[in-house]
Amino acid sequence: MFLIKKLITAFVLPPISLVILAAIGLWISRRFQRTGRWLVGLSLLSLAILSLPIVASALMRSLENRAPVQPQQLAKAQAIVILGGGTYHTPPEYATDTTSRHTLERIRYGVLLQKRSGLPILVSGGAPFGGRPEADSMKEVIERELGGKVRWLENHSRDTAENANLSAATLWASNVSRIVLVTHAWHLRRAIPLFEKQGLDVVAAPTAFTTFPEAPLMLFMPSAAALERSSMALHEWFGILAQTSFR
């Protein structure tokens, strides 16, 4: 089921979905020229629109609706939970799996919050595609490179829902119910309800915001970076819709 979900997501979201639409348009145009050309044009126009920074920023802004965590909120929490954001698989310079860019951004902020508050850390992330579990890599980087300390290790989850379910079981066993949840600002809108569903009291701790002021002209200059942000935002909204529909 997990792999099926990943495949469906990959083919439904851009850019693959738009490439498929263009291919369908080319095939249809052999018999229905006007309809085929319309589909090809629609796919190319959608790709161009999603590549605009102004569109990517608008999509991300709809998700990044949480303010940075405040000291008084930290004071009321019992633990910091950091969600994995992917693995850097078999990198030649490290000779073993390690944290991806997204995961590194999250653990860096989580350690900063630990140093400010003294709260224990739980790291969550498995190995959905094999290799070393994310949580193992996270613990290593936190303790060896960032000067933090991990108390709990949840290294079996494959997605955000399992992050919440398996982390909650570990936290409840230690009588922890009030947590600071660290993940990307665009991920929290989907992640928080999953942790609250487990009965936890959640304080949002967003990091790595993507919405920031840009020069007016640059807002209308298509880029691969903007397309990536648009795709991530649509992925999150797709996940939110799926959560809402299958409660």
Image (cartoon, grey):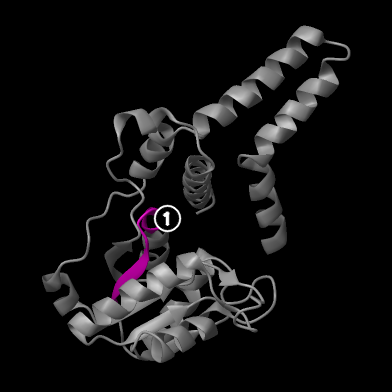
Q: Position of residue 236 (x, y in %)?
A: 48, 49
Q: Position of residue 206 (x, y in %)?
A: 31, 61
In the image: residue 69, left or right of residue 176: left
Q: Position of residue 186 (x, y in %)?
A: 39, 53
Residue under label 1: 190
* Magenta span includes 184: yes
Q: Position of residue 165 (x, y in %)?
A: 48, 73
Residue found farthest to the right:
31
Q: Between residues 31 and 51, which one lies in front from this camera angle?
A: 51
Instruction: Name the residue rendered at 66%, 33% in the picture.
Output: 18
Judged from the image, the secondary structure of the residue bearing numbered disc 1 is helix
Instruction: Name the residue rendered at 40%, 90% in the picture.
Output: 143
Instruction: Name the residue rendered at 50%, 43% in the picture.
Output: 234
- Say few, some or many: other residues with alpha carbon within 10 Å of mark 1 (under 14 / 14 to 19 / 20 or more): many
State whether residue 198 appears in this view: no
Residue found farthest to the left:
72
So how many labels did they put on this image? 1
Disc 1 residue type (three-letter): Arg
* Magenta span includes 227: no
Q: Quadrant of the N terminus?
A: bottom right
State whether residue 22 appears in this view: yes
| Range covered by the magenta-colored residues | 178-190
Q: Answer above or below: position of 123 versus 57.
A: below
